[in-house]
Image (cartoon, rainbow, N blue to C red):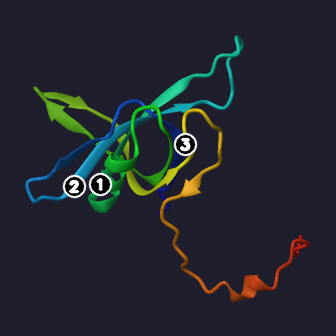
Amino acid sequence: MLNTVTIMGRLTADPNLSQTPNNISVCKFTVAVEDDIPDKNGNRAVQFISVIAWRQTAEFAARNFTKGKLIVVQGRLKNNNYEKENIKHYGMQIEVSHIYFAGDKSSKSTAVPVKSEVTENLSEYESLTDEGPF
C-alpha cells in the first residue's frame, strides 16, 4: 500500500527534542501549511500538522530548525490515537523520512535537499541534452 506525504510550511515553535527510555532521539514539532486556494475574501486557511522524527533525523531537525523557518517534510501518515479518562482521542501525524531546507523567512527560495540519495544507475540519463526526449 502507498502511504506518502510531502508538506511545506513554517514551524509554529522550536522543535522539541527528547529521548525515549531506550535513549532513542525523538523530535516533535508542528508545521503550519497555508492552503493554495484563497476563500472569497482572499484569505487562505492554515492547516496545523503534527510531525514526529526519530534518531538522527530528530537530532538534525532540533539542531537546524527554529520557529518560523520554512521546511519541507516527507514521510508517512500515522495514527496517534489514545484513550484518556475513558475518552478516545483520534489524530494523525506525519512520521518523517526526510527533511529539507526550504529557505528562510525573508526569502522565497526553492527547497534545498538536506540528504541526497542516489538509488539507481543514472547512465541512461547522462546522454540526455537540454532538448531532451520531450
Q: CA distance from mark 2 to mark 3?
A: 23 Å
Q: Could you classify mark 3 by the number of other residues whose Cα lies within 10 Å: few (under 14), some (14-19), or many (20 or more)?
A: some
Asked whether the beta carbons under mark 1 and mark 2 sit within 8 Å of each other, the answer is yes
Asked whether the beta carbons under mark 2 and mark 3 sit within 8 Å of each other, the answer is no
Q: Which residue position holds label 3?
A: 8
Q: Could you classify mark 2 by the number of other residues whose Cα lies within 10 Å: few (under 14), some (14-19), or many (20 or more)?
A: some
Q: Which residue position holds label 2?
A: 25
Q: Amino acid at mark 2?
A: Ser
- Ranked by sequence position, the earlier of labels 1 and 2 is 2
Percent position (x, y) of residue 117? 52, 72
- Ranked by sequence position, the earlier of labels 1 and 3 is 3
- Ranked by sequence position, the earlier of labels 2 and 3 is 3
Q: Which mark is residue 59?
A: 1
> Front-most of 13 and 132?
13
Mark 1 vs mark 3: in front = 1
SS class, disc 3: strand
